[in-house]
Amino acid sequence: MASIETIAAIATPPGQGGVGIVRLSGPKCQAIAEAMIGLLPQPRHAHLTHFNDTSGQLIDEGIALFFPTPNSFTGEDVLELQGHGGPVVMDILLQTTLDMGARIARPGEFSERAFLNGKLDLVQAEAIADLITSGTASAARLAVRSLQGKFSERIYQLVESVTNLRIYIEAALDFPEEEIDFLGDARVSTNLQYIVDELKQVITSAETGRLLRDGMTLVIAGLPNAGKSSLLNALAGRESAIVTPIPGTTRDLLREQIQIKGMPLHIIDTAGLCESNDPVEQEGIRRAREQIEQADRLLWVFDDQSDPENLSIEQALLPPNIPLTLIRNKIDIGNRKPEISQCVRGVEVALSAKEGIGIELLQQHLTDSVGYHGDVEGEFIARRRHLDALKRAAEHLAIATTVLENEAAGELVAEELRFVQNALSEITGEFSPDDLLGKIFSSFCIGK
């Protein structure tokens, strides 16, 4: 799908640097190269040369690289001009390419062209952006695996299995005169169960990949003076929040980003939840409840000396759909030992945030709660849209299994498998609406 337009962009970060790169892709690359450097460089060879503007004036000296179609990143002619990395030099080089017929590239347009020209699937294209923005070494390793096609391979294998089962079922439906009870054939139920099991494994891997890409959002909540800010400081390993004995010290949201064994965490400390006539405190409580609704996990902090009956009242105000960990704080006052225990309300961690006692137990609990143990071998990076598509596929597989077992309606089983196939194909881009593609590539940086 060759484009008639040639695009150009600065492919290196803004600011001063030893080297700066202007990248072009499209049919005018050869003509622009000949106009700016006087010749077309030998494909895939670095050529030391002078860069000239439209009037023949010298702009800079640097290296030119030419990658002819189809053996390039985008699948089109690609030209790279590597000069000295000053912002003025880069701007002049870019403007010269525009004067010679190129246009400014949209964010992600180079990767979009690579996808449209079949050089990458959608998962691999997204992995480029994820590799650039990786916040941890683990996330970077997983992004590389996705870029190499590890995630895509799993999806293609699933799609092939679903397709083969659809073909078998629909072929049997097309020849009813054979009077074969194909739905009673063990092959159908066995293959369907195989797909279900494989999809579960992919979802588990994708959830880990999504966690390492986006991080887990932890919201610390509780009554005033329960030690929420002390817990934030203990997890962050520094005095991030102001701590005083005065209830209501924290009135707004405090945010910290940390890592536990390579797992990124976004921690939000909130104002104490209580009844208040103070408009400032009321706004802090409103924001706290808003963050609680969006949390991946809630850490509910309460004083070791608090009344258990009051605790149940406090919990009744919490959203039931958010995973909850109870933090029994200030155990140093009553000489309680640090421990993790299971109670009616869920997991409870007894610790002292102020003294740093039991913090390692909480850290271990947090990694265990999402099944993360620092070993990312065999995993891949994933996004929320990937998980959404995988879970929709799982829902349709569950319906297909129920229909097969209870109704033996081949047409309905085949239709549910079609939905499964479409949901999985959205991930790699084989079946994607244009608005989805636009949204994905618009989040990329310019020049990629």
Image: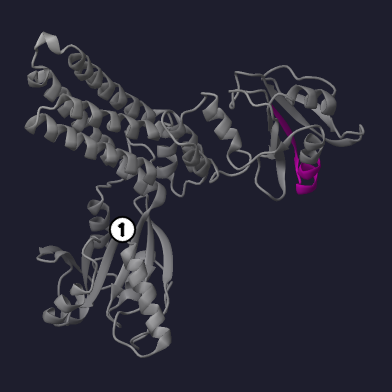
Relative image position of residue 81 (x, y in whole percent)? 74, 32
Picture quadrant of residue 238: bottom left
Q: Is residue 182 visible?
A: yes
Establish if 171 lies above or below 141. Answer: above
Q: How is the image coloured?
A: one colour
Relative image position of residue 164 (x, y in whole percent)? 25, 18
Determine if the magenta segment contains residue 401. no
Establish if 367 lies above or below 302. Answer: above
Picture quadrant of residue 265: bottom left
Which sits in the foreground, 371 or 194?
194
Furthest residue in direction top, as rendered = 178
Magenta-drawn segment? 79-92
Tell me how many marks there are: 1
Callout 1, which amino acid? Asp
Q: Residue at x 62, y 43 (%)?
A: 446
- Quadrant of image for the C terminus: top right
Which sits in the foreground, 179 or 355?
179
Circle 1 SS class: loop
Q: Residue at x 24, y 47 (%)?
A: 371
- Quadrant of image for the N terminus: top right
Residue identified by numbered label 1 = 296
Furthest residue in direction bottom, as rendered = 277
